[in-house]
Amino acid sequence: MNHRLVSRITGILLLFQALAMVACALFSWWDGATGPAGATAGLFKAAGITLGMALGLVAAGGRQRMAGRVPRREAVVIVGLGWLLSGFFGGMPYVFCPPGMNVAGAFFEAASGFTTTGSSVMSDIEAWPRGVLMWRSVTQWLGGIGILVLFVAVLSYFGMGSKSLFQNESSFRGGESGMARIQDTAWSLIRIYLTLSATCTLGLKAMGMTWFHAICHAMATVSTGGFSTHNKSVGYYSGWGNGWLIELWITVFMFVCSLNFLLIVVLVRRKWKRLGREEDALWLFGICVACILTIGAGRALGGGVDFVQALRDASFIVVTIVSTSGFGTADYELWPAWAKMILALLMLMGGCAGSTAGGFKVGRLLVFLKSARQEIIRAFRPNRVFRLTVNGNPISEEARSRTVFFLLMYLMICVFSTLAVAALEAGTGISMETCGGAVLATISNIGPGFGTVGPTENFGHLRESTQVFLAWLMILGRLELFALLVLFFPSAWRRY
């Protein structure tokens, strides 16, 4: 293990985080009179501690220029350790700034931000200073494309290749990244991310939001994170005359950012034919439309809700769930059980691979469904030769087996984690619906769950041990299981 390499790159990661904290502290100082006193000092204090640790790690890594790519063994450790350290140091502003938060809650809030989950332990969001709320949104914006991917494009300046880091971060995997050098692809992703963020911000500002609220909501939208600056989330604007337009604008951006960002890169380069064979994007669109119509019509016919209002509520909630954003307008806890079951399935599925969305991804669902179809036909026609493809790309037997294994492991972790949360909360009277909802909301990076962690509630009433466990589930889901789980099996990477 090259400990100096791990130390140096991890230090660079924390350096970026410290600079982001300084920017939020400067905003808090400029913002001045709004919010409780002490926010600026708390942000500067957190930034100073993070900066000190970052410089120490960079110094420990040495100054020599290192050629070649980052080995997979070191990349795995950097990815897992990087996200854990980001959660720890990113939580410091919540501890140092009024009204204050315990360490477990701060780690939960920071992990929720960086993993773009959107779950929160804040019972009164509007009581927090605007500088802290800005930091809260920034964590999601950075985490949306992945902190490690954000600086993978500039690692070449430090003399280190970055392909292993790029492939271990989230769902940016496979041959798509081979269409150009990995640094060029990363820069393309960043440019698109910035463009989407700026466009979303300008649109929200034009619709009547202040610059502060427009920027915060845009960062949470493009990252599909879901942190809002209001206790009622986006529902705060539902009563406005153009509230439906704000919801529609956010809905469009949530859906776009739940698509594969590499697909967006291709479309920006005007390769329109690619869209026709992008199966997971087309399936995601079809699933959203079907669920919106089903829930909207079902509530209108069976619940006596106005059809237009039912369709409006269903459109926003379905997209915010499938994109794993977690914004709130309507309280889906009041919806029929069958509608909540549809939402639970959407929570499991999530968006497309290579997006800022969580879940086990539409592409894996496609592989599973096509594999199931083949096995059913093969039972009656054993000599038939099959060719499995997704998005026009052939899927090998190894990839198919790995996908099925991933889905089974994902479901098993959900089941055992639900039992673990129930055990941690023993004696509190918590329901299994809440336990299951909390697990689905965190491992799929959704935000709100069901029961007492639903869209109008928060996670603040859970025990500190439960909050830390759920924060770990957020990181596990964000890294798609393997990149974090492998840290617990040193034999897999110690002698790689």
Image (cartoon, helix red, strand yellow):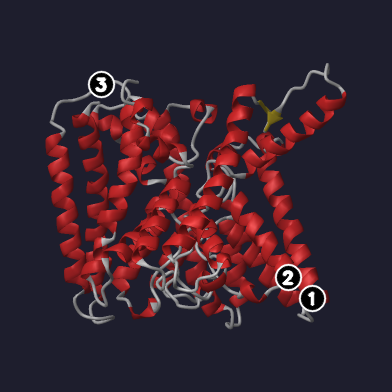
Quarter holding residue 306: bottom right
Q: Name which residue type carries label 2.
A: Leu
Q: Secondary structure at mark 3?
A: loop
Which label's residue is closer to the chain start, 3 or 1? 3
Q: Position of residue 437 (x, y in %)?
A: 55, 63
Q: Residue tagged by mark 3?
A: 67
Label 2: how many residues lie within 10 Å, few (<14), some (14-19) or many (20+)?
many
Q: Left or right of 431: which side holds 400? A: right
Q: Left or right of 157: which side holds 58? A: left
Task: Examine the rendering and report whether any part of residue 358 can be seen.
Answer: no
How many angstroms separate mark 1 from mark 2 (CA)? 8 Å
Label 1: how many residues lie within 10 Å, few (<14), some (14-19) or many (20+)?
some
Q: Position of residue 407 (x, y in %)?
A: 60, 41
Quarter holding residue 114: bottom left
Q: Secondary structure at mark 1?
A: helix
Q: Position of residue 287 (x, y in %)?
A: 72, 52
Q: Name which residue type carries label 1.
A: Ala
Q: Name which residue type carries label 3.
A: Ala
77 shown above or below 25: above
Q: Give the numbered dot on residue 311.
A: 2
374 shown above or below 259: above
Which label's residue is closer to the chain start, 1 or 2? 1
Q: Give the numbered dot on residue 300.
A: 1
Frontmost residue, 66 versus 440: 440
